[in-house]
Amino acid sequence: MFDPTRPSGPKIIAIANQKGGVGKTTTAINFASALAEIGQKVLVVDLDPQGNASTGLGIMPEDRHATTYDLLLDDFPLADIICQTRQENLLLVPSTTDLSSADIELIANEKRSFLLHDALRQTDMDAFAFDFVLIDCPPSLNLLTVNAMVAAHSVLVPLQSEFFALEGLSQLMLTIREVRQSANPSLRIEGVVLTMYDSRNNLSQQVEMDARENLGDLVFKTVIPRNVRVSEAPSYAMPVLEYDTQSKGAIAYRALAREFLGKTETMTAA
């Protein structure tokens, strides 16, 4: 999908929130799956040493022969790392706990903030013809997350529908501003998606109202409900769209993908 506001090649989106447990990896897995389901070719880059996105897409640790660690620190070509998931159009650069030492090792590298940027612009990337690259960031604002933001065209922020949710955004926004000023002036916020939303809960409704008042159109209309099927799916190593295709969670992530593509097309036409 061509967008004149960005360079040629796939649109790269960092999915980030320094707060853990907000549905970041769940969103990376299921948003990618929903995009792939409607014909977009998607690469998920697992940049979290916990490797949960890799497991959630069905790539077990014993099958991760090369990882994001090798991509960043050993200059491995993408073609030697990318794994095909069970879903058509959905591929993965997996992660293992080896990545947990990367922050320390990156400090000594003078190009430490640009390693992922350069890796995702290898010449062999063109052969894959990806439409989107989604980077699942670790739950912290460390060098790995900075690498993701330097590499990305935009940041998608999952926001848990809980007390103090908006307060946690301030540090993330500050980091995005710093990356804009120092390394990636075109970085923008793709949007904020409310996760773990319970329409019966007054608190969820209050968080939604506050988010929309403060952030306006940055907040996606689609909200991701608190849904047991979404929580169960990772233990079966699959996206919720595969685990229970008609669940409320699967339906919501499909709606998010459609809304996102609609916004992208609107921007392209503008």
Image: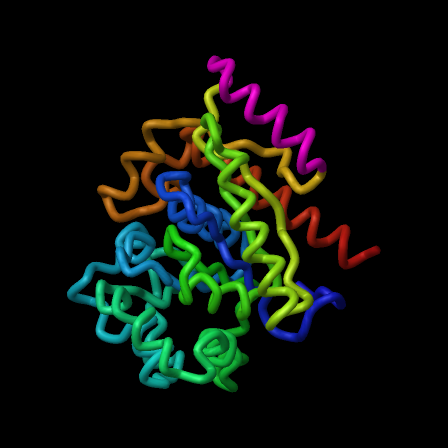
**Along the horizontal axis of the image, is 236 left or right of 42?**
left
**Along the horizontal axis of the image, is 209 left or right of 101?**
right
Residue at x 41%, y 29% (from the top left corner): 247
- Asked if residue 213 is among those painted magenta in the image, a careful observer would answer yes
The number of discs equals 0
Q: Please state the horizontal and vertical placement of residue 198, each as a whole percent of the image.
A: 46, 21
Q: On the rendered image, what quadrant is the N terminus found in?
A: bottom right
Residue 175: tell me if it is visible: yes
Is residue 61 shown above or below 25?
A: below
Residue at x 24%, y 64% (from the top left corner): 96
Residue at x 32%, y 84% (from the top left corner): 74
Q: Along the line of sight, which residue is nearer the eye, 84 or 136? A: 136
Residue at x 30%, y 47% (from the top left corner): 238
Q: Quadrant of residue 177?
A: bottom right
Q: Please state the horizontal and vertical placement of residue 49, each as a whole percent of the image.
A: 28, 60
Q: Quadrant of residue 196?
A: top left
> What span is in magenta?
199-216
Q: Please state the horizontal and vertical placement of residue 5, each as a whole percent of the image.
A: 74, 66
Q: Please state the horizontal and vertical placement of residue 203, each as a whole percent of the image.
A: 49, 18
Query: Farthest residue in the right direction?
Result: 270
Q: In which quarter of the image is residue 87?
A: bottom left
**Along the horizontal axis of the image, is 247 left or right of 37?**
left
**Along the horizontal axis of the image, is 70 left or right of 221?**
left
- Asked if residue 18 is among those painted magenta in the image, a careful observer would answer no
Is residue 199 shown above or below 90?
A: above
Please name the predominant secondary structure of the magenta segment in the image: helix
